[in-house]
Amino acid sequence: MLLLYSTTYLIWIGSEIYLNRFARSGNIQKERKDQGSEWLLWISAFIGVTVSSLIAIYSDQPIFSDFRWGQLGLLFMISGVTFRFIAIRQLGKFFTVDVILHKDHQLIQSGLYQRLRHPSYTGIMLTLFGFGISLNHYWSLITVVSIFFIALRNRINIEENALIQQFGDQYRQYQKNTARLFPFIY
């Protein structure tokens, strides 16, 4: 069972490192608009995962009485990583880990982007939710999701401001017709 958990965690972390390394804009001459939010996301993820893991190790407030239910968390993690990569694939060449808009940038409104403005972030949140569930601890779940969500809200606001600058009323209309991360919730 430890092998299953370890493999799932490594796939998740490896996929994020892969994106960080290979999904950059690659052009330092373009104006970066992320205002340090990329680093804030990485730091919040590290702190959230570390603190929530320590909480699970050193205290006992299980979500499920049978720890096997924690395996449900692995399903959420795998679903989240998959959802994130589908969103990235649908965005295509316009996806980068740094906030940069190209002159030929297009506003994608199909696929997952038909309902959600930031489905790749929805994937991250599903993954972190799954991580918290897999630890089978209430406070671990709340901690990992909350810490990352605070940084993510900042990043989303930065991205949406950049998109409004680029697309104006077209993006404002898109905002009215879509949810940020989760339909009917946020």
Image (spheres, grey):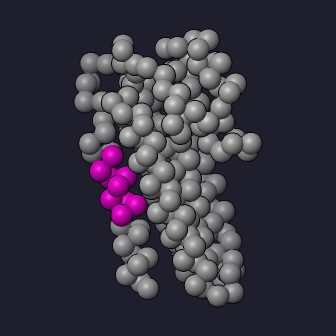
Quarter of the figure that contains the N terminus: bottom left
Q: Is residue 75 left or right of residue 101?
A: right
Disc tally is 0
- Corner quadrant of residue 24: top left
Q: Does residue 83 belong to the magenta stretch?
A: no
- Corner quadrant of residue 164: top right
Quarter of the figure that contains the C terminus: top right
Q: Is the residue 50 above or below the residue 6 in the image?
A: above
x, y percent for residue 182: 65, 45
Going 61% across and 36% down the picture, which residue do you hit?
115
- Corner quadrant of residue 181: top right
Q: Is the residue 118 above or below the residue 66 in the image?
A: above
Q: Is residue 47 left or right of residue 143?
A: left
Is the magenta region chiefly helix, strand or loop? helix
- The span picked out in magenta is 11-19
Going 66% across and 62% down the picture, which residue do you hit?
142
Q: Is residue 106 left or right of residue 75?
A: left
Going 65% across and 32% down the picture, which residue do you hit?
178
Nearer to us in this view, 144 or 58: 144
Nearer to us in this view, 77 or 115: 115
x, y percent for residue 131: 53, 66
Q: Is the residue 180 above or below the residue 15 in the image?
A: above
Nearer to us in this view, 105 or 36: 105
x, y percent for residue 13: 38, 60
Asked whether the viewer can see residue 91, the reply is yes
Going 68% across and 27% down the picture, which residue do you hit?
177
Asked whether the viewer can see residue 52, the reply is no
